[in-house]
Image (tube, rainbow, N blue to C red):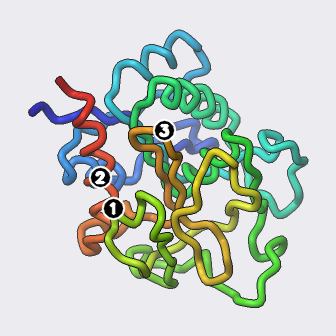
Amino acid sequence: MERPTIGVLPLYDGDKDSYWMLPGYMKGVEAAGGIPFMLPLTSDAAQIARIAHLFDGFLFTGGHDVNPELYGENAEAVCGEPCAERDAMEAALFEQVVRLDKPAFGICRGLQLFNVLLGGTLYQDIPTQMQSDLKVGHKQSPPYSEPVHPVYIAKETPFHGLVETEVLQVNSYHHQGIKRLSGQLLPAAKAEDGLVEAVVMPGKKFVAAVQWHPEFNYETDGYNFRLFEAFVKACKKLKI
């Protein structure tokens, strides 16, 4: 069977006006049997439609904060810098991907983006906005491959079948997170403080996302490698 082609959304450096990429996103896809391609950032609707049809699946990467305007809020001082180019491209592409029922895997920002585009909201800054009696360290220091807190997997979701465990130790590097979960998503994992750490979209071949960073430890953590494997496997099913 041919290896499926995976479109990977680029990271963007505004100061240098350049695209860039963490190798783990690409190598994780390769190790799982896919061929990754870093995509351009474009607002051209025809190009986005062509991209959506061209690839077998899409990896929505981490990076900039999602613009709060997308979920009906003004940016507060605690919100990080958004990237208008990424927000526009990824919103248009995600709409096409969902319509075509192609596999989509979101990581960190990707999870937050899926939730927002499907009608949910975010904490613009977890430390200052999320009320919880339990304090979980969601923004670790290097090395980013090391787990820093557990997440608890919901047994009733397909995600449990992917990782085959009820508790997963994960790394964590984010200051935003899901506040109100979209009604089109199911919570698949939560941290001890109640923050949603993984989601799935029912009724689709594969639309799933995690808040942690499997691209940093897929080589040493079998559970996280299973996420890449499940995503690429879903993309393979589209191949003739």
Query: Marks 2/3: CA distance?
Result: 27 Å
Q: Residue at x 80, y 47 (%)?
A: 68
Q: Quadrant of residue 94?
A: top right
Q: Is residue 15 left or right of residue 199?
A: right
Circle number at residue 230 = 2
Circle number at residue 162 = 1
Q: Residue furthest left?
A: 1
Q: Which percent across, then down, holds residue 128?
A: 83, 74
Circle number at residue 19 = 3
Helix, strand, or loop for circle 3? Answer: strand
Q: Residue furthest top?
A: 46
Q: Residue at x 63, y 42 (%)?
A: 14
At label 2, the amino acid type is Ala
Quadrant in the picture for the C terminus: top left
Mark 2 against mark 3, which lies toward the viewer? 2
Q: Nearer the viewer, residue 152 or 14?
A: 152
At label 3, the amino acid type is Tyr
Circle number at residue 91 = none
